[in-house]
Amino acid sequence: MKAGVRTAGGSDPVEVAIIGAGIVGLATARALLARGVRSIRVFEAERSVGAHQTSHNSGVLHAGLYYRPGSLRARLCAEGRERIFRYCSEREIPVRRCGKLVVATDEAEHARLDEIRQRGEANGLTELRVLTRREFTEIEPHAGGIAALHVPHTGVVDFAQVARAIRDDVQSAGVEIVTDGALLEADQEQTAWRLRTPQGVTRARFVIGCAGLQSDRVARMFGVDPPVRILPFRGAYWALHSQRADLVRALIYPVPDPRFPFLGVHLTRTISGPVEIGPNAIFTWSRHGYRRGAFRPSDAIDALTFEGFWELAARHWRVGAAELRRAFARRAFLREARKLLPGLGDRDVRRSRSGVRAQAVDREGRLVDDFLIADADRSIHVLNAPSPAATASLAIGEEIARRAEALSP
Ligand SMILES: Cc1cc2nc3c(=O)[nH]c(=O)nc-3n(C[C@H](O)[C@H](O)[C@H](O)COP(=O)(O)OP(=O)(O)OC[C@H]3O[C@@H](n4cnc5c(N)ncnc54)[C@H](O)[C@@H]3O)c2cc1C
């Protein structure tokens, strides 16, 4: 896959096949094009691009505050965030750098705000300020809490819209996107992979797996034995009724629980205007478990036969039970949300949409924190791309394209 090489068409293999047209797969196609690769085919299982995590998230362009300095998440989030801001202004996609508040509701959380600020600074963020209640209520007059960290770099966008714009760009540069094209099987030939989808057979010299909730399964089709399994975590949102939307100007976040990679239920004024509260994080028995109580036998068996699932359950069942209670009981949910927004009335919210996170878990039951990208024989696999992977997508694409160039024969 050296830059500038073109394939002749016909039955010749494509240079690169990408499995999954979420924002990460599409950004990877874009980065490969920028490196001069012209023969790229993207396979997407669904009828349209960005149908899963890319279109079921909070739409927050993260600053890169919490991540371990030096980690892939820290580096690619900061880089990707600025790339998305630039890309949106070039393509005239609505985006807003609205800033966010991380609100401490007691003294223990107050002490953690300073640690978070220091970590953010270690990740290159400037202008982070811990504000008193009087100061932060000038930014968010209705927020609760005793102190808050102000993060001016954070923004909001519609990642599905960004993904569609990238699709249009890459398609007009010659990338073929095959929808209804779930990869069913991959066989290794001497110099290429033979890929079978409902749309026929394609041969590809190099394959990049960006399959989100199915990424471990796709990796296994290429002979990779992933050290992790994807466990799906459903995140449900509530929405503020429009007449109460003035309770939130931008973004109000809690101080996150350091034991988990999820940031906690937060308040988001979305790019299109409505204010959402969520998402929670509850294990679901289906990798497409958008509905409460969804169950898919093959996904359940995959989880139950994985030793990491049992380790995780043994360690965190209390937190899981509390999340479940809040998910089902409106009053428990409201009690939690009122810590951030004390003026929230019983009738101010309604249940809204949900998303399912692809979270890699290792055999010891640890939720994998960092992005995980595995290099293999003529293939690369994104095995963990949780939040902030949408923010980081353009930088993740660039990272993968660089690795693919180095690995290709
Ligand atoms: C509730 C929630 C809130 C979030 N909030 C944020 C946020 O505010 N900011 C942020 O930066 N990130 C956020 N994220 C994370 C972000 O959405 C994801 O990290 C990002 O979308 C991952 O993109 P992806 O392309 O890897 O995965 P996806 O968008 O899931 O795409 C993977 C694609 O692969 C396809 N696929 C799967 N199997 C196959 C196959 N066999 N053949 C062909 N195609 C296949 C799928 O159909 C899918 O379209 C959130 C996620 C969730 C769920």
Image (spheres, grey):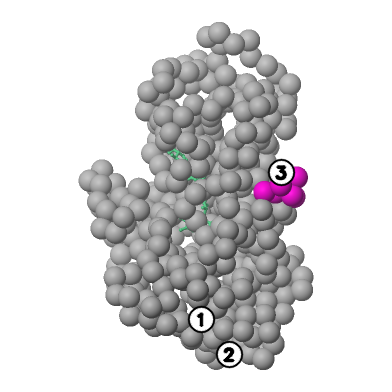
Over which residues does the magenta segment extend?
86-93
Q: Nearer the viewer, residue 4 or 168?
A: 168
Q: Mainly helix, strand or loop, the magenta region?
A: helix
Instruction: For mark 2, give the secondary structure.
Output: loop
* Residue 180: x %, y % from top left: 41, 29
Q: Which mark is residue 146?
A: 2
- From the image, tell me which residue sits under label 1: 340
* Label drawn at residue 399: none
1 or 2: mark nearer the eye: 1
Closer to us: 159 or 307: 159
Q: State which quarter of the image contains the C terminus.
A: top right
Instruction: Measure the alpha-carbon separation of dots 3 and 2.
Output: 40 Å
- Direction from residue 124 to residue 200 in the image, left or right: left
Q: Nearer the viewer, mark 3 or mark 2?
A: 3
Q: Which circle's residue, 1 or 3, is located before the other in the chain? A: 3
Instruction: Determine the residue positioned at 50% across, 56% down.
Output: 57
How far is disc 1 from disc 2 in space, using C-alphas? Answer: 10 Å
Task: Indicate whether residue 377 is drawn in magenta.
Answer: no
Residue at position x 67%, y 80% in the image: 139
Cβ–Cβ below 8 Å for labels 1 and 3?
no
Q: Nearer the viewer, residue 393 or 111?
A: 393
Residue 60's place in the image compared with 2, above or below, is below
Please state which amino acid type lies under the numbered disc 3.
Arg
- Residue 91 has which mark? 3
